[in-house]
Image (spheres, rainbow, N blue to C red):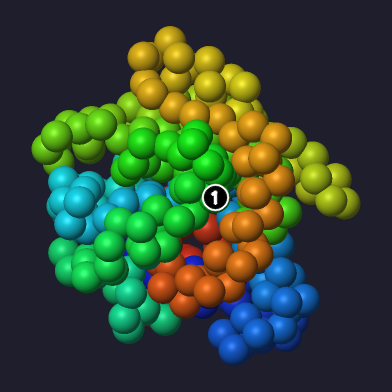
Amino acid sequence: MKILSLLRLAEDAGYIAGGKRNRLGAIQDSRIFEQNLAALDQSHSGAYAFIAFHPVADKVVAEYIGEGSIGNDAGSHILVLFLQGDNVPQEPRALFPGDALFGVNLSIEEHPAYALANKFFPGATRPKLPGIVFFNRLFKTASSIYVVLEGTDKEQIRAQCRTVFDAANQSAEQTKEKDDVKIWSIDLDRFAGRLFDLGVAYRRAGKKGVRAAAYIVGTWIKKNAGSIVVAIPKLVIPQLAKLEKKS
């Protein structure tokens, strides 16, 4: 598995869509930043899964990610995102075990991955961590499902993630969006039903959480997007394939 900066991937999607490259510094320009994210949604034509974990408190999750199978485990309709930290790669490169150690010196309360998960469930309803936030779009996110990761070793985490990713992919369907373009999305009702049948602990954002979903493309992502990487699966979207050939 390889990893790549989310911003670089979105920038490249924006270039393909509009014929003009919106450089990474465009994160300071909200309009260009959002255009890039919208272009990535179109070219990816699938959903996203953000892994919320702390590299010390959730060591077994970091170990699983560090082994490099999560991008393929996610399947054909889901791109996995996680925080990588310094020297975020601008070209696809192999994953190193240390790439999963972002924020190792931060407290749980300070860690941005936990902050994102908590934003969906404010106050006393905050979720148990670590977990995975599933959502269909980076731009104008509408809702989400949060799956709790409960394994005590990396093999249990791997098995649970594969089960959950499989349920998400089985719940995917093509829906028409802008200009009648068909894009794959996770049917969150169907996904929730599958998780319930499997006995997997999950939380679905209520009204406050749905409103907070905009936080993904708001304050949080603008602050942390430079540290987010995409886990590149074997089946890649078009601009990823081009970048793979160059690297």
Name the residue beneath numbered marker 1.
119
- Toward the front, the furthest residue is 124
**Residue 16: percent from the left, percent from the top?**
68, 74
- Of the 4 image quadrants, the one containing the N terminus is bottom left
- Of the 4 image quadrants, the one containing the C terminus is bottom left
**Residue 123: percent from the left, percent from the top?**
53, 42
Asked whether, in this view, residue 2 is left or right of residue 68, the answer is right
Q: Nearer the viewer, residue 208 or 169?
A: 208
Q: Residue at x 53, y 15 (%)?
A: 193
Task: Tell me which corner region of the image, top left, top right, bottom left or bottom right, holds residue 215.
Answer: bottom right
Which SS class for mark 1?
helix
- Number of other residues with Cα within 10 Å of mark 1, as a class: few under 14, some 14 to 19, many 20 or more: many
Q: Nearer the viewer, residue 112 or 242?
A: 112
Q: Nearer the viewer, residue 243 or 107?
A: 107
**Residue 21: percent from the left, percent from the top?**
66, 86
Task: Tell me which corner region of the image, top left, top right, bottom left or bottom right, holds residue 220.
Answer: bottom right
Amino acid residing under circle 1: Lys
Q: Residue at x 34, y 41 (%)?
A: 129
In the rendered image of this protein, does residue 140 appear above or below residue 19? above
* Residue 145 visible: yes
In the rendered image of this protein, does residue 86 appear above or below residue 100? below
In the rendered image of this protein, does residue 77 appear above or below residue 23? above
* Residue 185 visible: no
- Toward the top, the furthest residue is 197
Asked whether, in this view, residue 191 is left or right of residue 189, the answer is left
**Residue 216: percent from the left, percent from the top?**
60, 58
Asked whether, in this view, residue 194 is left or right of residue 218, the answer is left
Q: Residue at x 36, y 79 (%)?
A: 89
Q: Residue at x 41, y 73 (%)?
A: 227
